[in-house]
Each structure stands twice: as C-alpha cells, then as structure tokens.
Amino acid sequence: MSNASSGGQKAAAGSGTAIMADPPRGLVFVTGATGMVGGHLVEKLVEQGRPVRCLVRQTSDLSLLKPLGVEIVYGDITDDPQKLSELIGEAQTVFHCAAMVDDWADREVMMRANVTGTEHMLKACVGKQSLVRFSMVGSMVVHGMGEQNYIDESAPLIHTGDNYNYTKILTYEVAERYAKEHGVPVVVCRPPYIYGPRDKQFFPRLFENLKSGTFKFIGDGNQPFTIVYVMNLVRALMLAADADVPAGETFLITDGESITRRELLQLICDETGYPMPTAKVPVGVAKMARPLIEWMAKRKGERPILNKFKLKFMATPMTYNVDKARRVLGWSPVAPPRQTLRETIRWYRDHHPEMMPEQPAKA
C-alpha cells in the first residue's frame, strides 16, 4: 500500500469519485515554480492558504514568487538525491513541474533535465513517511506521431526517434518504477500542448510566424486537436494530489473539447488583427520534405523550420478522452476552451504588444 492511503484520506461517500473528504494541508514542495505551469500552481496554492516551498536555481527570476511570500530553497532537480531529500523535508505533497520542453535540444541535455532530474526527485522521496503524494506533469508526446483519435490512458507509448519523445517516455517509465518498486505515491497528469498567460512557447511561436508572414497551414487546417489551458492542468494536478488513488495512476488532461488548427488561427486573428493566413502545404509534401529539412538544419547548426514535433503540431489529428479524470478526480475544465483561448490571446495583446501586428503610422 502506498503512502497515498495514509493521512486520513477518504473517498467522498456516494460520489463515485476518489476525491478526498479532508485533503492534507501540510507543506507543499514545488519544482518548476518559475515556469508557466509551476508558477500558476504556486499562485493557486497560496490562494488556498497552503504553505509552499519552491525549489529554484540561483539564477532564477523570482519576481513572481517573492510577492507571494513562499519559502525559497536553492538547488536543482539534478542535484544529489540526499540534498533534495533534505530540501523536501517533511513536505506532504510534492508537485514536480520542472522539465525541459524543446523540439530540437541535444539528447544528453534533455536526458539530464527530464530523466535524471525526475529520478533524483523520486529517489529523494523514497521512504518519506510524511509524503502523501508526488503529483507530476507528464506529456502526451509519449503517444507518438500517428493519428490519436480520442485515445485514453490505455494507449501505448510509442518511440518516434525525437529527443523530447524519447526522454518523456523514459521519464514516465522511471516514475512508474518508483511507484511500483519503492512505494513513492506518484500520480501523473499527462497534458498535450499547454497554453495560457506567461507561456513562452505555444502562442509566442504562433505570433512570431504570423508577424513574419511565414505561417503556412499543413493540409487544409481542419484537422482537430485538443490542447489544455494551464489552469485546467493546475486543477488536475491539485485534485490528483488530494485523491485517494493507487500509486502510479495516470490521467490525461485537456480542455475537454477539440478545436481545429484553422479555428485556432481564426480566433488569434480575430483578437489581434493579424490577417488570416491562406498559404498551405500539402501534408504529403511536408512529410516528404521533413527529413531533408532536418538534415540541412543539423548541418547548419540551426533549428529547422519543420521537424517531427512541428509536423505533429500542425497536421496530426490529436484528440483525447478525459473521462477518467472526470470520473475519478471529479475534474472539469475551469471554463469553455474558446473562452480560455480568447482570454489568453487578450493577455498577450495587453502584456506583449511587441508580438502584435504593427500599427500603421498616423498621418
């Protein structure tokens, strides 16, 4: 039996879910607290009055965390597990949000950040009697490059050869092993592409391509995909941390509804004033050209304009079944996805005018 069954946890009577009747209110330890997911999570935890300790690097930007009054400890998830164990201390919950998300980084660098870092965090938690839950962020990238039509948690993990996919599969396998062999009360929330305020990847890249005029649809843009608003993921992480479920459980987390690439771009253009892109490349042409584009980019030491990760993002149907999270965790989206998408776009419009279309000069 894992530690997740201790600490006075009870399933809500007659609810059909595993939500705890009286969640623990002890110390919470957060990795990745200066990132988008971790930062929003810390804000929510503080809002609920939870005592929070954040693991940060000496070079981290603490402008978000300091006003929140959280405890700051310095270190790195790749530090010696004994040091990490001392920093974690008597925390009841560990939220592991730190990871390297990149579509073109060196494999060794990504292995250290994603696999070694997660294993060191898990090893640091082995045998901790105070620990009720180790709630961590996974990734839908583990399900490969093929069409994903409302798949659920039983879908296989598929290696595609790219470094992010490879390291995230190994990360999940490490977490699963520590749950089964060492009793670490791990639960994994597995999101697709994440968006929201303070994101430095998803929307910024789209805005960059729109501003430069280089955006092209791959195919007709009508392929559906499911993405996730950061607060929907935060809600899932917190519910999973408080749920009486066995160690090793995984939950797919999305916005609960799909959207097409064309619909997403239309929302962006409606809110920002960018012209709606009309250029498109046939899917077959993009698939044939991708290996050559990647090869040329490697020779030049540059990021390719198209790689496996980008091809999947632009062209592959990706929809997911989140019934398990709804049923077991009592999870639901914080708001309809088109509302959270519009709110996110407006946040960028207000906070990053440099990403918006240039205004014509006044006469």
Image (cartoon, rainbow, N blue to C red):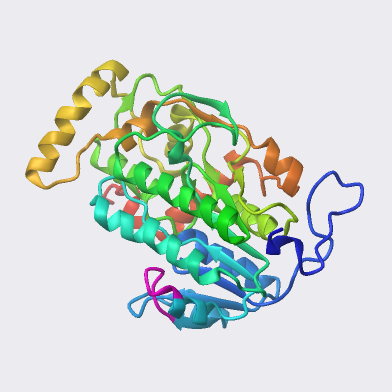
| Horizontal and vertical percent position of residue 326 | 72, 42
Quadrant for residue 272, please give it. Answer: top left
Residue 57 versus residue 3 in the image, above or below: below
Farthest front residue? 181
**Whole-percent x, y for residue 197 in the image:** 49, 57
- The quarter of the picture where the N terminus appears is bottom right
The x, y position of residue 16, in whole percent, is 84, 43
Residue shown at 52% from the left, 45% from the top: 191
At 37% from the left edge and 52% from the top edge, which residue is drawn? 101
* Residue that sits furthest to the right in the current view: 14
358 sits left or right of 13 in the view? left
Q: Is residue 75 magenta?
A: yes
- Is residue 37 located in the magenta-colored stretch of the structure? no
What's the residue at 43%, 34% (across, down)? 265
Judge whether residue 276 can be spotted in this image.
Answer: no
- Residue 332 falls left or right of residue 149: right
Quadrant location of residue 186? bottom right
In the picture shown, does residue 145 fall above or below 14? above
Q: Main secondary structure of the magenta part?
A: loop
Magenta region: 74-81
Which residue corresponds to the image point at 59% horizontal and 33% vertical from the top-left? 154
Q: Which quadrant of the view contains residue 280?
A: top left
Judge whether residue 336 can be spotted in this image.
Answer: yes
Q: Is residue 94 left or right of residue 157?
A: right
